[in-house]
Amino acid sequence: MEQLDFFSVPSPCVGICQVNNRGYCQGCYRSRDERFNWQAMTSDQKRQVIRLCKQRYLRILRRAKGNSIEVQQVDDNPQQSLF
């Protein structure tokens, strides 16, 4: 049974619109297609994108743990507050 949505899923955009070397936004970790098609997505699709963004963020954080300078840059990212 489909759950009713009373509130729209807000965009995860944090205003840092720069693409990293993997093609994901450095602010919200969405791909280009995910950013451009956000308004046309259903609530379920938006929640799935946010789950993927969280996985991408955690993957980058794990990769950066080996280098303390990179960890500092990741820790300053306002995207953490979304997860």
Image (cartoon, helix red, strand yellow):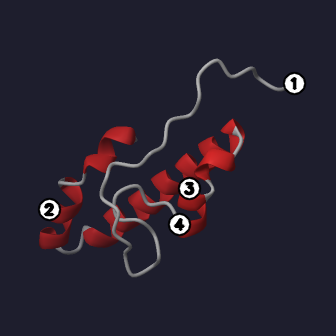
What residue is disc 1 on?
Answer: 1
The mark lying in front, picked from 3 and 4, is 4
Q: Are marks 3 and 1 in contact (CB under 8 Å)?
A: no
Reading the image, the residue beneath label 3 is: 52
Count the labels in the image.
Answer: 4
Q: Position of residue 27 (x, y in %)?
A: 34, 58
x 53%, y 68%: residue: 32
Q: Disc 3 residue type?
A: Leu
Q: Earlier in the sequence, mark 3 or mark 4?
A: 4
Q: Nearer the viewer, mark 4 or mark 1?
A: 4
* Front residue of this view, candidates 23 and 40: 40
Query: Of all residues shown, which one is farthest toward the bottom?
Result: 21
Separation (CA) of disc 2 from disc 3:
23 Å
The dot on residue 32 is none
Q: Residue at x 33, y 48 (%)?
A: 14
- Above/below status of 16 relative to 1: below
Local crowd size for mark 4, using a 10 Å CA cut-off: few (<14), some (14–19), many (≥20): some
The answer to whether residue 9 is above or below residue 18 is above
In the drawing, what numbered circle is on residue 72? 2
* Residue at the spot of label 4: 31
| Alpha carbon distance from label 3 to label 4 | 10 Å
* Amino acid type of the residue tagged 2 in the rendering: Gln
Q: Dot 2: few (<14), some (14–19), or many (≥20) neighbours within 10 Å?
A: few
Position of 48 with respect to 12 (left or right) is right
Q: Amino acid at mark 1?
A: Met
Viewer-proximal residue, 58 or 4?
Answer: 4
C-alpha gap between disc 4 and disc 2 = 24 Å
Q: Position of residue 40 (x, y in %)?
A: 68, 48
Task: State which tag comes first along the sequence, 4 or 1.
Answer: 1
Tell me which residue sits at (48%, 43%) in the image. Answer: 11
